[in-house]
Amino acid sequence: MPGRTRRRRQGRRATRCPSRPGPIRPRAEARCGAGSSTPTRPPGACPGRFPRASAPGGRCAVVAASAGGGRGGRTARVPCGGHPVVVHVTCPHGAGPVPPGVPPQVSPGVSPAGDSSRAVPLAAPAPPLGNTSGMRITLPSGTPAEIHRHDNPRMGLVIACDIWGLRPLYDEMVRNLAEKWQMSVAAVEPFPGLDLPADDMAPRAAAIPRLSDDDNLRDLTEAADALGTPVTGLIGYCLGGMYCFKAARSERFARIASFYGMIVVPEAWRSKSQGEPLAHLINGYAENVLAILGGKDPYTPAADIDQLRSTGATCVVYPEAEHAFAHDPSRPVHRPDDAADAYARAEAWLLSALG
């Protein structure tokens, strides 16, 4: 049966990288055979990089069994600290295409300063080999997070996600911010343990009153601890931007950049476990906060912005921008020029923590 023979041969060829030897990059999830959520690194492994996994002949060991996401997603066993770690990986040498359903999304805008390199692509080709490594981890609280450690980070950065939670947008954002800004980066799921639809806003909004400030801020702190960087900042969007304001109650994050976070908790979201952002800012460290805001955002009216300024937070308002104008180029409200400028300001603000 020639067809069956041809398929078997194709499967065998798929177990190796067709281009050149090299390390594989952990992609979506790691499961440690010894029960540890974070595999230990063997002696001599480069900090921030997984050890090399090779097939006979020194070639990239990307196995043929599909682990979801099309040919780009595979499973491989990587020796780590004396026991195997099973990881979902993508071959960085061109062995497989980008997973289906994740089209490249690049913010092409140029800031008023004319520095187009400051625009942050939200999905782009993989960074140079060895510069970052990333995987899905579980924090001590049980909350999932996507983490990418840079080999030589200037600082750490935690991302507080929007109402849609962890998804490919944030997987790519974490990787690209790590590469672009030379930081170790982690993004945290805001609805741990809840089975919520990926395409329906109503159940997610209805779940917000059940969230706890203490739990969510604990998760952001645990993500910062997982990065292990001496200086760590926080950036967040929408719901996550609101939690950025609340995180200013402590000095755990040296600098905070909130993108269109709610300054006052919306009426439908209020509960005993949801404190007011302004109260956290007034009693905390508002001077560490940069707020990126849209002049046409119904969630942040002018009166609320005035109150935010009065706490000592720094506010930058883009007059024509609506809610969520910067972090997701697929949205109709996306404004490339404003987004590029906002990201440049956020980067400078975060790095100002280094002196």
Image (tube, rainbow, N blue to C red):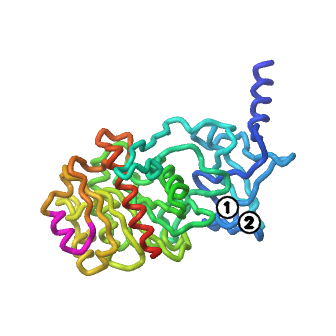
Residue 49: mark in rendering: 1
Q: Secondary structure at mark 2?
A: loop
- Give left or right: position of 293 versus 217: left
Q: Secondary structure at mark 1?
A: loop
Q: Position of residue 179 (x, y in %)?
A: 55, 56
Q: Position of residue 221 (x, y in %)?
A: 44, 73
- Give left or right: position of 54 versus 316: right
Residue 190 appears anywhere in the view: yes
Q: Position of residue 149 (x, y in %)?
A: 58, 63
- Residue placed at 62% from the left, 40% from the top? 72
Q: Amino acid at mark 2?
A: Ala
Residue 45: mark in rendering: 2
- Residue placed at 47% from the left, 72% from the top? 232
- Residue placed at 45% from the left, 76% from the top? 355
Q: Amino acid at mark 1?
A: Arg
Q: Residue furthest front?
A: 114
Please tell me whether the stretch drawn in magenta is mainly helix, strand or loop. Answer: helix
Magenta part of the protein: which range?
304-314
Foreground: 63 or 173?
Answer: 173
Q: Position of residue 62 (x, y in %)?
A: 72, 45
**Is there a contact, CB below 8 Å, between mark 1 and mark 2?**
yes
Picture quarter with the N terminus: top right
Is residue 312 positioned above or below 301 on the image? below
- Give yes or no for residue 311 being in the magenta stretch: yes
